[in-house]
Image: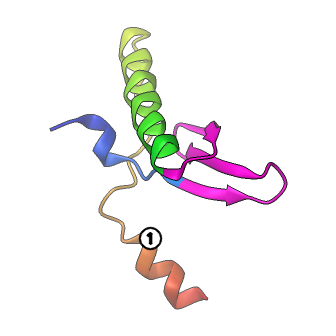
Amino acid sequence: MNGSIRYVKIVEWSEEDQCFVGSCPELFYGGCHGGDEKQVFAELCDIVEETIELYKTDGKPLPATTAGKDYANKMLSVA
């Protein structure tokens, strides 16, 4: 199992930038951007994997993962 699947990845439209912006809040913000949502998500997944490898190479502990916390449904109950 790939370690990157344990982190929430967000791709959202930015009115200010007029493009999609991808981030992984536990690892970084605003990691990539572009005009095609699917391409931004694919690039975001690659960046998350690369970031995890950098943590490992540097001997740093990874931040707590976000998978399995059901954030989508929790956000619905707040809205």
Could you tell me which quadrant the C terminus lies in? bottom right
47 with respect to 32 (left or right): left
33 with respect to 68 (left or right): right
Q: Residue 37 location, x and y as percent?
A: 52, 51
Image: 61 above or below 70: above
Determine the secondary structure under disc 1: helix
Q: Residue 48 location, x and y as percent?
A: 43, 33
Q: Residue furthest front?
A: 36
Question: Looking at the image, which residue is at 67% across and 59% down?
Answer: 13
Q: Is residue 51 magenta?
A: no
Q: Residue furthest right?
A: 16
Residue on which disc 1 sits: 71
Q: Magenta-highlighted stretch: main secondary structure?
A: strand
Residue stretch in magenta? 11-37
Residue 59 lies in what quarter of the image? top left
Q: Is residue 12 magenta?
A: yes
